[in-house]
Amino acid sequence: MNNKSILITGASTGIGKACALHLDNMGFVVFAGVRKERDKDTLYKDASDKLKPIILDVTKEDTIVEAAEIISNEAEYPLYGLVNNAGIGISGVLEATPETEFRKLLEVNVIGLHAVTRALLPLLRKNKGRIINIGSSASFMAGPGASSYAASKFAVRAISDSLRLELKPFGMFVSLVAPGAIESDIWDKAKVYKEKLRNNVAPELLEAYNLFIKAGDKMVDIIKPIPALEVVNAVTHGLTSNKPKYVYLVGNDAKKAYKLSKLPKSLFNWLVMKKITKVSEGS
C-alpha cells in the first residue's frame, strides 16, 4: 500500500472524506479531489502528510486534465485505484423537476464519472488497477419521486457492468458500491432543495402530488442513516481483496431495495404504493 496511490472524487465531505482519511491511515497515498481551496485545509488537519488534496471538479475538463497530470507526475506512487464518489442528489416527481436540475445531476453523477474514469484509465491500466463506483440503493429501485436520481444511479450501474468486462483482459476490476441511507450532509442539502422546489411550483401541482409529498416528508424521519464507515469498509475491500465483489450492498435498505427490484412489476408497484399510502396516513 505504501507505494500505491488512490484518487477519490468528492472527498471534501461525507463518504468521500471518510474514504480518503481511512485509506490514508492504511498507508495508501491518497489524492483527494475537492472543488474548493478551503476544503484542502480541512483535510490537511485530519490526515497524514502523505495525503494530497487536489482541486477536481468532475464537471470541468480543465481540472480533470490537471489532476491527471499531477497524478502521472508522481512516478514514485503509481495510480492503483479510482473511487468515483462525487455526486449530488435531488428528489421530486418528474413533473416538478426542471430539466436544468436534471441536466446538472447527470453532469455530475454520470458524465463526470465517465470523464474522470476515461482520463485516468491509461494510468490505471499500467498497474492493473481497480475502480470503485459509488452507486446507491437507487441503482436497483426507482420509486416515485426519485426518477431523476435513480436514472443517474442506474446509469452508474450500467457503466460499471460494461466497464468491468472491457477491463477484464487487462487484469483490472470494477466494483459497484451501492449504499442505502448514509449519515451525511446530503440530507440537509436535500431538505434545502426540496423547499426550493416546492416554492417554485404551482399550488395545484403540490395538491396533485400531495400523497407523495406527505409520505416523503415522513419517510425522512423514519429512515435511520448508517455510518459512512460501512461504505468505507466496502470500498476498502473492493480495493484490497484478492476476490473483490461485483456489487457491495451496504445497509439493510439497500439489500431490501435489491430484493424488491427482483419482484414482478405488478407486485412491486402494489407493495410500494401500499407502503406510501400507509406512511402518508401516519399508520
Image (cartoon, rainbow, N blue to C red):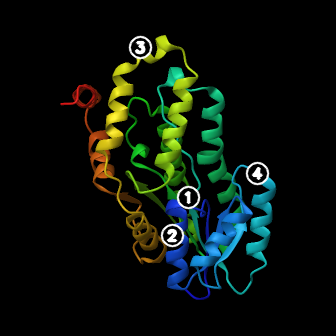
Viewer-nearest of labels 3 and 1? 3
Circle 4: residue type: Lys
Residue 132 seen in the figure? no
Residue placed furthest toward the top: 204
Residue 228, horizontal then vertical, whole percent: 42, 63
Circle 2: residue type: Cys
Residue identifier under label 2: 19
Residue 222, horizontal then vertical, whole percent: 29, 43
Residue identifier under label 4: 60
- Marks 3 and 2, the one that precedes in the sequence: 2
Q: Quadrant of the N terminus?
A: bottom right
Mark 2 crowd level (few <14, some 14–19, many ≥20, 10 Å Cα): many
Task: Say what secondary structure mark 1 lies in.
Answer: loop
Task: Tell me the CA gap for discs 2 and 1.
Answer: 9 Å
Task: Tell me the CA gap for discs 3 and 2.
Answer: 42 Å
Task: Tell me the CA gap for discs 4 and 1.
Answer: 16 Å
Examine the image and state in which quarter residue 117 appears: bottom right
Examine the image and state in which quarter residue 101 appears: top right
- Marks 4 and 3, the one that precedes in the sequence: 4
171, 77: nearer the viewer: 77
Residue identifier under label 1: 85
Circle 1: residue type: Asn
Looking at the image, which residue is at 75% across and 59% down?
A: 64
Task: Say what secondary structure mark 4 lies in.
Answer: loop
236 left or right of 42 in image = left
114 left or right of 274 in image = right
